[in-house]
Structures are given as C-alpha cells and as structure tokens.
Image (cartoon, grey):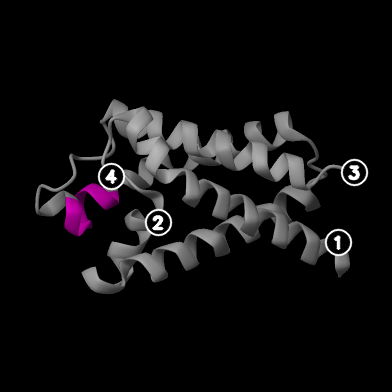
Amino acid sequence: MARTLRAAAAGAAAAGVWAAAEPGLRRFSHSPHSEPRLVGRMLAPERYWFPVGLSVHVLNGAVFGVVFDRLGGRGMLRAVAAAQIENACLWPTLLVFDALHPDVRDGSWPELFGDRRVLVHEVAGHVVFGVALGALLRD
C-alpha cells in the first residue's frame, strides 16, 4: 500500500510540476493550449475551469504514476518514454475536443488535432511530466 501511495503522490506531484510549467510551455510552443484548461472547460463553466481542470490533471497524474510503477517503471528516460506513448495513444481524442471544446468552438483556440503548436506543447509537457515522475520514483 505504501508503494502505491508513493507512486500516486509522485504522479500527482509530476502533474503539478507540468501545470506550473504551463506558462513557459505556452511561450515555448507559441500556443494558447493548456492541459488543465483542456479538461476543465469541458467539465465546468468558465469561472470554475481552473480548479476542476487542475484537479483532474493531478488525478490523472496520480493514476499514471501508479500504473507506471506497477509496470516496473523507474527512471527519467522510461518515464518520459511512457508519457510520450500515452500522449501518442491519446492524441486522436483531440478530434473529439475539436468538435466539442468551448474554446475551439468559439475560436479562442485553433483546432487542436492538426495544430503543430499544440503537438509541440503536448510533447514538451509530457517531457516535463516524465522527468519529474522519473526523478520522484527513483529507487
């Protein structure tokens, strides 16, 4: 149980590091995209998107940390690789976000699936997450 809690805490903390890096990721990628906003605006009204989106983002990180640990994952390189695999597997879901997300529908964001800036943002964000997770789950 302690190992599972440690892995969940590491994943949650790594997701928090990613969220804290969002302003820099947006500047780096030249994209308005934000991972917490992506989820938060789908689930909550404009005024509540940040706490909802951040909570879901951190929860997803915790789940990822546990799965990564259970699969024997350790170290930064493996964590970054696992995060990029997850990114590639989830990328097609952006087609759903393109059809439904309020920021895409009102023109605040470009369509996400084919936007290279969003791809750069997501790849970089998953690198940040993987580095933080790998550092926290060292033996």
- Amino acid type of the residue tagged 1 in the rendering: Arg
Q: From this view, report whether residue 88 is shown above or below residue 38.
A: above
How far separated are the C-alphas under marks 4 and 1? 36 Å
How far separated are the C-alphas under marks 1 and 2? 27 Å
Circle nearer the viewer, 4 or 1: 1
- Amino acid type of the residue tagged 2 in the rendering: Pro
- Would you name the residue on which mark 2 appears? 36
Q: Residue at x 41, y 36 (%)?
A: 25
How far separated are the C-alphas under marks 1 and 3? 11 Å
Lateral position of residue 123 relative to residue 41, left or right: right
Q: Position of residue 98 (x, y in %)?
A: 22, 47
Badge 3 density bin: few <14, some 14–19, many ≥20, Cα 10 Å: few
- Amino acid type of the residue tagged 3 in the rendering: Asp
Is residue 97 inside the magenta stretch? Answer: yes
Q: Position of residue 14 (x, y in %)?
A: 62, 50
Lateral position of residue 68 relative to residue 128, left or right: right
- Would you name the residue on which mark 3 appears? 139
Question: Which is more N-terminal, label 3 or label 4?
Answer: 4
The disc placed on residue 70 is none
What predominant SS class does the magenta segment belong to? helix
- Would you name the residue on which mark 4 appears? 95
**Over which residues does the magenta segment extend?**
96-103
Question: Which is more N-terminal, label 1 or label 4?
Answer: 1
The disc placed on residue 3 is 1
Q: Position of residue 114 (x, y in %)?
A: 26, 31
The residue nearer to you, when weighing 109 against 18, is: 18
